[in-house]
Image (tube, rainbow, N blue to C red):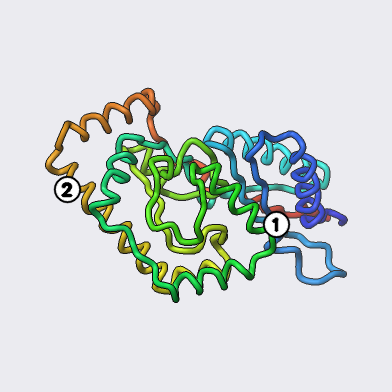
Amino acid sequence: MGRSALDAVELTNIGANYLREHVPDGSRIHYTITNGGVAPNIVPDAASVWYYLRGADRDAADALLARLLKIARGAALMTETEVSWDIKGGAYSLNVNHTLNALLTGQQHEAQPPVFSQEEQEFAASLAATLETSQREAALDKARKLGLEPGELLPAAFSEQTPAGGAASGGSTDLGDVSWITPVGQIITTCAPVGIQVHTWQATAAFGSSIGLKGMHYAARLIALAAYELLTDVGGVLAQAREEFRESTRGRRYAPAIPAEVRAPVPVYAGRRESG
């Protein structure tokens, strides 16, 4: 009857691609068609597409979702199909607690920064050599936006500016949700050569080596020492962290990104069939 669910999926994707021109900087729209039908000569009665949406913060992501759902409804209207969706997951941006970040970085000398051997330095250099110049420059630029001033390939320690925060990293983590419920501190230790992007084979090779192990152990010592300071509450640091948390949340009550009544960004289309 010419009611193609796949047409609706493709029109949604076209609309999403036109939307890219009109979203705030830092927004991301990713999608993949998860069901396009069973055969080329059969009009699909059902089709689906899976979207990832990213924004600079939770409000930006929610606004992007609202616009995408309008596009999906419009595609269903154009093709005389029906659309439904499920929110599979969602994450908040990180609510940085500078008091806890400073507490963590203050432990860096007592925690004994890692010492990387000549063999590890050579391994790091061999991994960095596999990167194209543009890849390495992009990674270094991202590091600077997070407060890092990278110099050597395997920096042993970090400065007060190292803790993540103040700039969108382009990733997502459920730690962001936790940070709107309770004060959270975050530090960055060296587990791979500077310039290596995560989700790459170079990162996997570094994380699984003694470089990654030393960075992980260093992070564990930093966390343990900071936890001791919080338990003993030297200098009232716990109260300071709580006060900063109250100021940063400004009374905003945390609500999960997945509405209870929705539970699902994935438009799923079903073609209408006339009885007759």
Q: Which residue is mark 1?
A: 134
- What's the mark number on residue 268? none
Q: Circle 2 sits in a helix, a strand or a loop, which is it?
A: helix
Left or right for 122, reference 107: right
Q: What's under tag 1, amino acid-wise?
A: Ser
User: Percent from the top left, x then y, of residue 222?
Assistant: 28, 53
- Residue sitting at 83 percent across and 43 percent down? 78
Neighbourhood count class around disc 1 (C-alpha, 10 Å): few under 14, some 14–19, many 20 upward? few
Left or right for 198, reference 130: left
User: Percent from the top left, x then y, of residue 38?
Assistant: 76, 70
Q: Is residue 138 visible?
A: yes
Closest to the camera, between mark 2 and mark 1, is 1
Q: Which residue is mark 2?
A: 228
Q: Quadrant of residue 178?
A: top left
Depth order, front residue of 275/249: 249
Quarter of the image with the N terminus is bottom right
Depth order, front residue of 28/202: 202
Depth order, front residue of 130/167: 130
- Residue sitting at 41 percent across and 69 percent down? 211
Labels 2 and 1: the sequence-earlier one: 1
Q: Circle 1 sits in a helix, a strand or a loop, which is it?
A: helix
Quarter of the image with the C terminus is bottom right
Residue 132 against residue 269 in the figure, above or below? below
Total label count? 2
Q: What's under tag 2, amino acid-wise?
A: Tyr
Q: Quadrant of residue 35?
A: bottom right
Residue 233 against residue 202 in the figure, above or below? above
Left or right for 219, reference 78: left
Left or right for 84, reference 204: right
Measure the alpha-carbon separation of dots 2 and 1.
43 Å
